[in-house]
Amino acid sequence: MADKHYRSVIKAISWRTVGTIDTMIVSYFITGDLVMAVSIGSIEVITKMFLYYLHERAWDKTNFGRVKVVENDYQI
């Protein structure tokens, strides 16, 4: 079973929300500047969402780690 493209987009958005909050918190602790932390988070949210989408679609094209479900060829 393959995922639809919109599933990958929604997963990318939800994961990036969590990741961006983390980036902003870490950036704030490092810089001590809230404006700089939000700026860093704003830039990385776009780039990483795009990269995640490409990564997800690439994994969808490979069968590595997938198990083929074999249905019974008879009925009882």
Image (spheres, rainbow, N blue to C red):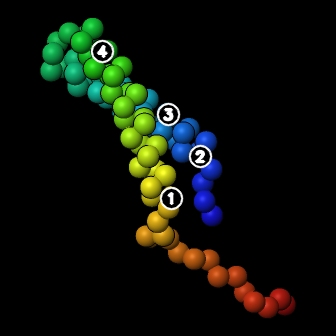
The residue wearing badge 2 is 5
Residue type at numbered disc 2: His
Q: Are marks 4 and 3 in contact (CB under 8 Å)?
A: no
Q: Where, by quadrant of the figure, is residue 32 drawn?
A: top left
Residue visible at 44% across and 55% down? 58
Mark 3 or 1, closer to the camera: 1
Residue type at numbered disc 3: Ile
The residue wearing badge 1 is 60
Q: Position of residue 66 (x, y in %)?
A: 50, 70
Query: What is the distance, in whole Å, between disc 3 and disc 1 at their CAs?
Result: 18 Å
Which of pointers 3 and 2 lies earlier in the amino acid sequence? 2
Q: Which mark is on residue 39?
A: 4
Q: Nearer the viewer, residue 21 or 63?
A: 63
Residue visible at 43% across and 70% down? 64
SS class of the residue under badge 3? helix
Q: Residues within 10 Å of mark 4 (few under 14, many from 20)?
A: few
